[in-house]
Image (cartoon, rainbow, N blue to C red):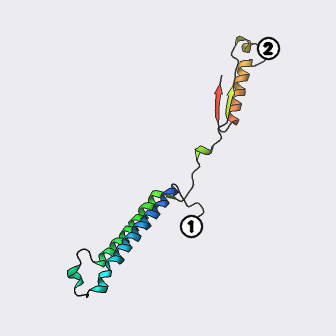
Amino acid sequence: MIPADFHFIRPYWLLAFLPLAFLLFMMLKRRLRSRKWETFCDKELLPHILIGEKPVSRRKSAFLIALAGSLIITALAGPAWQKLPQPVFSTQSALIIALDLSQSMNAGDISPSRLERARFKVADILEKRAEGETALI
């Protein structure tokens, strides 16, 4: 049973199973080609004629290559059990706030001053804004 959150971080590495399968196929083909001598020679003479590894050790080496290759490719693909939020997909909306800082903003007609009210308003906007870039001019 595979959980729903199981995924590979780099799934393109799984394409490396194709060259691994090709390598194993070529090893099997070479092994089958070397068995042609068994049809022409006696089994007692084969160890004296053939130079190289025994077929049993070739079978073990093919199995070890398949096992090691599978483990390496799977590790390179990066299996993961949980998905983390990707910051790449956050909204990129930008907000520009233009604030007048001239002497007219210090007028005493409103309590607190216009500049203090504008500062509170900018603070409220920034609190409500969850994400995105904000600029103050």
How far apart are labels 2 and 1 at the CA level? 69 Å
The answer to whether 51 appears left or right of 104 in the picture is: left
Q: Closer to the camera, 59 or 6?
A: 59
Q: Residue furthest right?
A: 109
Q: Quadrant of residue 119?
A: top right
User: In the image, residue 70 lies at what x, y percent?
Assistant: 43, 65
Q: Closer to the camera, 86 or 125?
A: 86
From the image, tell me which residue sits under label 1. Answer: 2
In the rendered image, which quarter contains the C terminus?
top right
User: In the image, residue 90 lies at what x, y percent?
Assistant: 63, 43
From the image, tell me which residue sits under label 2. Answer: 109
The amino acid type, in three-letter code, at marker 1 is: Ile
**Residue at 71%, 31% in the rendered image:** 125
Q: Closer to the camera, 57 or 46?
A: 46
Q: Secondary structure at mark 2?
A: loop
The answer to whether 23 appears left or right of 1 in the picture is: left
In the rendered image, which quarter contains the N terminus?
bottom right
Q: Quadrant of residue 54?
A: bottom left
Q: Quadrant of residue 87?
A: top right
